[in-house]
Each structure stands twice: as C-alpha cells, then as structure tokens.
Amino acid sequence: MTTETDKSTDATDNINLDGLTELATLVGAAQDALTDDMVTRLSSVFSEGITLLDRLVRNEGVVHLLRELDRPENQHFLISLSNAITAASQDLATAPPAKGGVIGLYKLGCDPGTQEGLRMVSLICARLSESMREMHRHGS
C-alpha cells in the first residue's frame, strides 16, 4: 500500500533522474562536438578571463571607478557621451573636409557647442588636477 507521500517522492525522483539524464546527454554531445584544439583554446580563454577578473577586483582604482559609474548621474553622462560619439562620427563622415586656417578656427571657436565642449573638458581637467594634488598631499 503506497501513500501520497511515497507517490510524491517517486515523481520527484523521476524528475531528478530525467534532468540528470538530459544533462548527461548534453555533456556527451558537447564532448563529441569539441575538438582537442577547441578545448585547449576554451580552457586558455577561461584561465585568462579568471586572471583578468582577479586583477580587476584587486585594483582599488577600478573598483572605485565601477562604484562611481554605478551612480545615476554618471550613467546619464556615459549615455550622453556614447550618443555624442555616434552623432559626431556621423557628422564628421558627412561634412566636407575643413579648409583650415585661422579664420576657420575662429569660426569654430565662436560656435556655442565648441565653447560648451571646451568648458566641460576644462572642468573635468580642473577637478582631475585638484583630486590628484589632494591624493599626493595625503600620500594615497
């Protein structure tokens, strides 16, 4: 006489065995499909990837950068930067070549977009210099 609990256990065991059988079939098929050269390359890539990951995690600067990049304002900045790179690439590809000269440079300098870009680069460089001086003062 079997109880409900025994039937439930039998069903669970069948599901687990079916899953293991499918997994074993998958592993066997993968072994058949992979050549020795492919296995060697995969193990090399895996090993180098683990080494790289270890170096990245041990690097305080990279960890700090990743924490900073996780902030919403920095994510917006990165999205804006990537959009700007794409748009600038398209603009540059379709624009005629610059004629050069002082007058062309003057016209470019009068463009509000150029002034804003120079302002942003100037602010980033000023903050970078300030941060580096502060780090050297504290010996960090």
Image (spheres, rainbow, N blue to C red):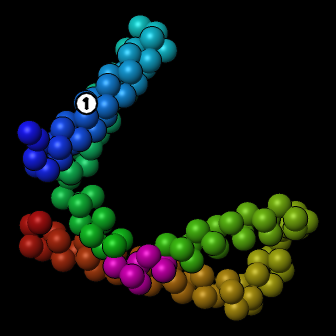
User: Would residue 70 be found to the left or right of residue 132 on screen?
Assistant: right
- Please state the horizontal and vertical placement of residue 44, each as a whole percent of the image: 34, 22
Image quarter of the C terminus: bottom left
Give the magenta range.
71-77
Q: Is residue 62 above or below residue 88?
A: above
Q: Residue at x 12, y 74 (%)?
A: 137
Q: Per the image, is 123 magenta? A: no
- Please state the horizontal and vertical placement of residue 138, each as a whole percent of the image: 9, 73
Q: Per the image, is 76 magenta? A: yes
- Please state the horizontal and vertical placement of residue 50, each as a whole percent of the image: 26, 36
User: Would residue 52 be found to the left or right of residue 26 on screen?
Assistant: left
Q: Residue at x 27, y 58 (%)?
A: 62
Q: Amino acid at mark 1?
A: Leu
Q: Residue at x 84, y 80 (%)?
A: 103
- Please state the horizontal and vertical placement of residue 6, each as a whole percent of the image: 11, 43
Magenta region, main secondary structure: helix
Name the one closer to the observer, 65 or 113.
65
Location of residue 22 (image quadrant): top left
Name the one closer to the observer, 20 or 12.
12
Q: Is residue 41 visible?
A: no
Q: Is residue 71 above or below residue 43?
A: below
Image quarter of the N terminus: top left
Q: Is residue 52 above or below residue 138?
A: above
Location of residue 88 (image quadrant): bottom right
Label 1 neighbour load within 10 Å: few <14, some 14-19, many 20+: few
- Mark 1 sits on what residue? 17
Location of residue 54 (image quadrant): top left
